[in-house]
């Protein structure tokens, strides 16, 4: 009898334990253990006045040294910043991804002031992950950042702007428009929309916001809370209903998810609000989410472009450079629109072609004859193209090294991954839309750069150190997590396969994040020539396109047209970003000064303003800390683009890069050069000019990308990728030497009788 009671007791305890585990797992599934993580609270400490004044004084001194008279202030900022209010940023912050935990908006505010020493920044969390509560908190947090930065509207520690990212992704060239940041001049409720406007469809970030199994929290039990918080984050997103369609944006209820399917739909909704806004496309050559063969052409159609809003383009970011056009093609299309895989050239190895090579090599190793292996290679190329952004999954078991340098721009400066030349800024400026033959439609972008940081670290490129914290895309912390998250490849097979779109690999490895890890960089920066450092002055500079981008270094750059005509017959000087009609030979001046070299550690104002713990959490012990020594500018490169004047004019003939290379004498004081274009007055066609100021070589994280070794014919035969997971030690910064640079905004010059824009 006692034995029976003992057995019953054991069974009872076991049942209770099973019940407890079941209740625990059920609670985890329902998000009962998760917390809502708010925007945080920034430090109320202000920067010393002498620090801000010292920046302006150093710029004035540098300007005088290169002959710039009466300079405006050059202010540096970041207009592309994500916090853990973005779902992908929250995901990257989890322990399984080697993340450091939540990075709220308050972190970004303090980082901009005490770590990166920026003059302005904007919040751009993905609209697709926003909720009514998060948008209210975002607005309040940005206002709080503005308040702690100082009540003097013309002289704050940092100027802040409110916005979001519209993150559209298409599976085909026809339905892909890409990502755009939207920023607003105002901060108050009556100056911004009631809700962010996201994208729609099955290929958006919102559609990809899958749930997370609570099993991850159980597996990583000592660090379980962030997983529960992420589950709660996703539950809140999914609980927001879609807004009804066919209703003007201001008339929609507050508590719904509003979306725009195309850029035109986005512009129309912004028009319905009537607030002053700027829309900034970015990452257009970044092939991680941009289908092969995508070009700017359909975006230039008047129905899809709003030049009053889409004023600027981000030419570089932590996802690489999207400036340069190349004539090679990653895919071709026939008259019926069918995709074909082009053969490789010395300049480019198409990924679809490499897919066939991998299968062909395996087929031969397996003992099949040449005809069979050639047929399988052709099949592999077709399969790759058929599944577009997921084409790499059609080659079972292919590793990063198997792909060599397929899909990449070999001779671009710090290129975006899987480069799409039709999405480059140069291509955008070279094309014209002839829907109205008498008035061709053209892009007239100003150029900026920014970070696209996902750790609430605006302007994080001030030092090329600490790869885990200063570049994006950190991935699984060990092999077991790589396997759980879908990154472990299938066994290699000697034949390509088609994909079951209903049974794809788990997690984000549907896209090529393993190879892309070698292309993630530190921050780019946007610079403005402003009449003051307040929000209004920064906004005015952005609107008039008197802006430029840098790859991260705080290069000072001036680019001016010296002889713009006026109505009274005299001439004036016009800055970068201007547009003018003229008949004479245009003459230009360029002045550039290199960035300050950095000292280790943080300046006193940072260490005195934040606790040691806060400083470590935000800056990891390293801040923008300039010495008195500047890097040297080695040369000025001039790019001339002469946009299409007839339909189908070959773009490769219109982009001259570099058109001129002007050497600079070695001097810390900087570089001053002038040039003209006597061909303009006889060419009878518009011309676009911009310049790059090139610094002396210096090391940069992932500056070598895949670090290929090439044979005598230029073919990559071996590579040494910088994995963004456990396979590359995170203490290894994967440094390679690069030439940091600044890109001016273009100056647009038309023949006087055809000018559609007057001199400013």
Image: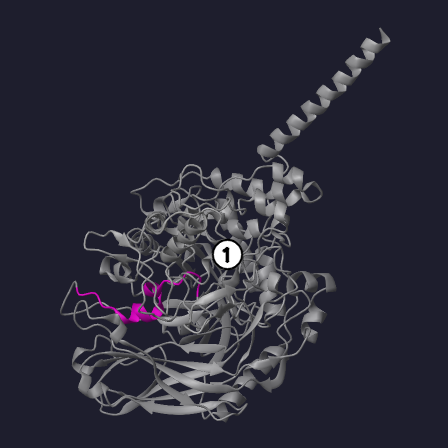
Quarter of the image containing the C terminus? bottom left
* Residue 533 in view (yes/no): no
Q: Residue furthest top?
A: 1
Q: Residue 540 in the image: x percent, y percent?
A: 40, 72
Front-most of residues 369 and 126: 369
User: Residue 441 is drawn in which quadrant?
Assistant: bottom left
Question: Image check: 593 left or right of 275?
Answer: right
Identify the colour scheme used: one colour
Q: Residue at x 50, y 78 (%)?
A: 739
Range drawn in magenta: 416-434
Q: Residue 134 in the image: x percent, y percent?
A: 52, 48
Question: Image check: 738 left or right of 547?
Answer: right
The correct choice, above or below, for 33 with respect to 655 in the image is above
Alpha-carbon neighbours of circle 1 within 10 Å: few (<14), some, or many (≥20)?
Answer: some
Q: Is residue 671 magenta?
A: no
Question: Image check: 184 left or right of 481?
Answer: left
Quarter of the image containing the N terminus? top right
User: Residue 111 is drawn in which quadrant?
Assistant: bottom right
Question: Image check: 185 left or right of 10?
Answer: left
Q: Residue 261 in the image: x percent, y percent?
A: 33, 48
Q: Residue furthest right?
A: 2
Q: Which type of secondary structure does the marked residue at label 1 adopt?
A: loop
Q: Is residue 427 magenta?
A: yes
The correct choice, above or below, for 98 with respect to 483 in the image is below
* Residue 61 in view (yes/no): yes
Front-most of residues 704 and 135: 704
Q: Residue furthest left?
A: 438
Residue for badge 1: 400
Q: Residue at x 72, y 61 (%)?
A: 613
Q: Residue 433 in the image: x percent, y percent?
A: 21, 65
The correct choice, above or below, for 88 with respect to 22 in the image is below
The correct choice, above or below, for 693 with respect to 465 in the image is below
């Amino acid at each position: 009898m006692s034995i029976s009671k003992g057995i019953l007791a054991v069974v009872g305890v076991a049942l209770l334990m099973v019940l407890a585990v079941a209740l625990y797992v059920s609670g985890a599934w329902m998000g009962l253990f998760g917390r809502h993580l708010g925007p945080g609270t920034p430090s109320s400490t202000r920067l010393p006045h002498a620090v801000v004044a010292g920046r302006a004084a150093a710029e004035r001194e540098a300007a005088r040294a290169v002959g710039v008279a009466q300079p405006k202030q050059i202010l540096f900022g970041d207009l592309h910043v994500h916090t853990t209010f973005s779902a992908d940023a929250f995901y990257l912050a989890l322990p399984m991804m080697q993340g450091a935990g939540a990075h709220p908006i308050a972190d970004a505010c303090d980082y901009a002031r005490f770590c990166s020493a920026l003059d302005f920044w904007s919040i751009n969390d993905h609209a697709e992950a926003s909720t009514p509560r998060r948008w209210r908190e975002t607005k309040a947090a940005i206002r709080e950042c503005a308040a702690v930065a100082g009540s003097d509207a013309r002289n704050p520690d940092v100027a802040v702007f409110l916005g979001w990212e519209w993150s559209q992704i298409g599976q085909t060239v026809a339905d892909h428009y890409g990502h755009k940041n939207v920023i607003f001049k105002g901060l108050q409720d009556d100056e911004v929309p009631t809700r962010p406007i996201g994208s729609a469809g099955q290929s958006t970030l919102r559609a990809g916001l899958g749930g997370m199994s609570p099993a991850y929290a159980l597996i990583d039990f000592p660090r379980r809370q962030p997983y529960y918080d992420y589950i709660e984050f996703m539950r809140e997103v999914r609980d927001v209903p879609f807004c009804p369609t066919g209703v003007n944006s201001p008339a929609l209820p507050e508590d719904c998810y509003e979306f725009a399917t195309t850029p035109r739909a986005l512009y129309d909704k912004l028009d319905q609000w009537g607030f002053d806004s700027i829309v900034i496309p970015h990452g257009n050559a970044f092939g991680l989410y941009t289908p092969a063969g995508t070009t700017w052409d359909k975006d230039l159609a008047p129905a899809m472009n709003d030049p009053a809003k889409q004023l600027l383009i981000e030419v570089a970011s932590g996802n690489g450079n999207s400036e340069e056009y190349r004539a090679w093609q990653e895919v071709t299309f026939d008259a019926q629109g069918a995709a074909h895989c082009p053969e490789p050239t010395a300049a480019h190895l198409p990924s679809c072609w490499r897919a066939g090579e991998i299968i062909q090599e395996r087929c031969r190793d397996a003992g099949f004859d040449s005809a069979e292996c050639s047929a399988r290679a052709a099949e592999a190329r077709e399969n790759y193209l058929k599944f577009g952004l997921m084409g790499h999954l059609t080659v079972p078991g292919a590793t990063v090294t198997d792909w060599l340098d397929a899909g990449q721009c070999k001779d671009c400066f710090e290129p975006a991954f899987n480069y799409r030349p039709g999405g480059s800024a140069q291509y955008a400026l070279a094309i014209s839309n002839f829907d109205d033959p008498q008035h061709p439609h053209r892009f007239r972008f100003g150029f900026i750069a920014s970070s696209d940081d996902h750790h609430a670290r605006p302007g994080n490129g001030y030092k090329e150190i600490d790869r885990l914290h200063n570049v994006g895309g950190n991935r699984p912390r060990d092999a077991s997590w790589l396997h759980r998250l879908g990154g472990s490849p299938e066994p290699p097979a000697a034949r390509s396969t088609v994909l079951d779109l209903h049974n794809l690999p788990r997690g984000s490895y549907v896209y090529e994040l393993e190879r892309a890890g070698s292309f993630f960089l530190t921050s780019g920066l946007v610079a403005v020539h402003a009449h003051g450092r307040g929000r209004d002055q920064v906004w005015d500079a952005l609107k008039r396109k008197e802006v430029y981008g840098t790859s991260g270094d705080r290069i000072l750059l001036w680019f001016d047209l010296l002889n713009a005509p006026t109505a009274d017959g005299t001439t004036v000087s016009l800055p970068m970003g201007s547009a003018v009609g003229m008949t004479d030979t245009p003459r230009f001046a360029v002045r550039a000064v290199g960035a300050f070299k950095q000292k280790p550690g943080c300046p006193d104002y940072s260490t005195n303003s934040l606790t040691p713990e806060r400083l470590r959490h935000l800056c990891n012990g390293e801040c923008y800390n300039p010495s008195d020594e500047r890097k040297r500018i080695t040369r000025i490169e001039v790019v001339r683009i002469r946009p299409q004047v007839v339909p189908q004019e070959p773009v490769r003939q219109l982009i001259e890069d570099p058109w001129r290379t002007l050497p600079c004498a070695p001097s810390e004081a900087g570089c001053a050069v002038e040039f003209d274009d006597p061909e303009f007055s006889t060419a009878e066609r518009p011309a676009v000019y911009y310049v790059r100021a090139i610094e002396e070589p210096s090391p940069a994280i992932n500056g070598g990308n895949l670090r290929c070794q090439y044979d005598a014919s230029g073919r990559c035969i071996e590579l040494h990728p910088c994995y963004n997971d456990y396979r590359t030690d995170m203490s290894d910064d994967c440094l390679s030497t690069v030439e940091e640079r600044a890109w001016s905004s273009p100056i647009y010059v038309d023949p006087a009788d055809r000018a559609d824009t007057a001199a400013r």
